[in-house]
Amino acid sequence: MPTETDNRLGTYLKDRRTRLDPAALGFSAARRRTSGLRREEVAQRSNISPTWYTWLEQGRGGAPSAEVLNRIASALMLTDIEREHLFLLGLGRPPEVRYKASEGVTPRLQRVLDALEVSPALVKTATWDIVAWNRAAAVVLTDYGKLPEGERNILRLIFGNPRIRDKQYDWDSVARFVVGAFRVDAARAGAISEVRQLVDELCRISPEFEALWQDNDIHVHGEGLKRLNHPILGSIALEYSAFAVDGRPDLGMIVYNPVTTSDADRIRSLVNPRPAST
């Protein structure tokens, strides 16, 4: 007998099917008793048996393979979130990650960053390109807006920019952590092949990076303490926390909070400098 999970999968498939416009997909819209595609049309678009697809909707098809679910997801024109839900219903797990290059952040997410007055915050991709930041990040970490887009990469800055290297309180520890966390992020996002060119480039310009990459250490970029030797602020301590961006597996946000009130006040003085007295 069909299980509750089978029934939920069938209900979800039927719901998604009825939301599609037959005419937009090249099917005749005439003589239809219900809205959406027919079962045999979904099966045709999925390149599977109409009988088996009917059984899936009726909760009698058993567990479909990941390949079949991907075909059905494409046939039903599911979004990434809808596709993930389909896999959770059909196989009890999310689909394998398919990396997509980031298209930047929404204005709403940028406003979240900008609301953090004294907390440097940035958004990075799975390949650690920085795609958004706030004013505090520009004055405390790096003014990314003054860098060419191709240089707004955390690994390129750590291993190829002497000024950034000099700001690190303990560069060796920072470098080891960054490489290990980068390795984990790229693997999670399914972007191993996409980072190969960057890795090869860094191995050529930095023997230190090459050695760390060969070590195969891994780290989780969750939370911790970062110390900087800032050219204006001097020694400053920041607690950092990393966050996933919901619905955007290609992006991650890092927020750095000043440890002390004094650190916060000094950052504020750079973010909002007072006009010179006359």
Image (tube, rainbow, N blue to C red):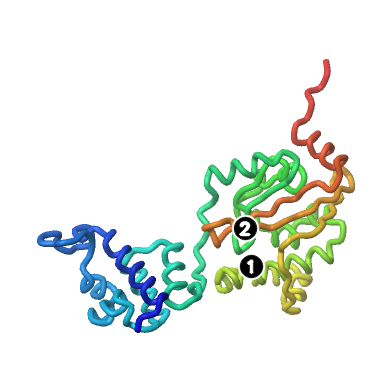
Asked if marks 2 and 1 touch (Cβ < 8 Å), the reply is yes
Task: Identify the mark nearer the N-term, 2 or 1.
Answer: 1
With 52 as the anchor, is 179 left or right in this view?
Answer: right
Q: CA distance from mark 2 to mark 1?
A: 9 Å
Residue at which label 2 appears = 252
Q: Return the x and y of residue 158 as percentages of the image width and height.
A: 75, 60
How many other residues sit within 10 Å of disc 2, few (<14), some (14-19) or many (≥20)?
many
Q: Amino acid at mark 1?
A: Asp
Q: Return the x and y of residue 163 as percentages of the image width and height.
A: 80, 52
Q: Return the x and y of residue 128 as percentages of the image width and height.
A: 64, 61
Which is nearer the eye, 265 or 190? 265
Q: Secondary structure at mark 1?
A: helix
Q: Amino acid at mark 2?
A: Gly
How many other residues sit within 10 Å of disc 1, few (<14), some (14-19) or many (≥20)?
many
Depicted 68 relative to depicted 76: above or below = below
Assign the N terminus to one quadrant of the image.
bottom left
Outermost residue to the top: 278
Which is nearer the eye, 275 or 75? 75
The quadrant in which residue 156 appears is bottom right
The quadrant in which residue 188 appears is bottom right
Residue at which label 1 appears = 185
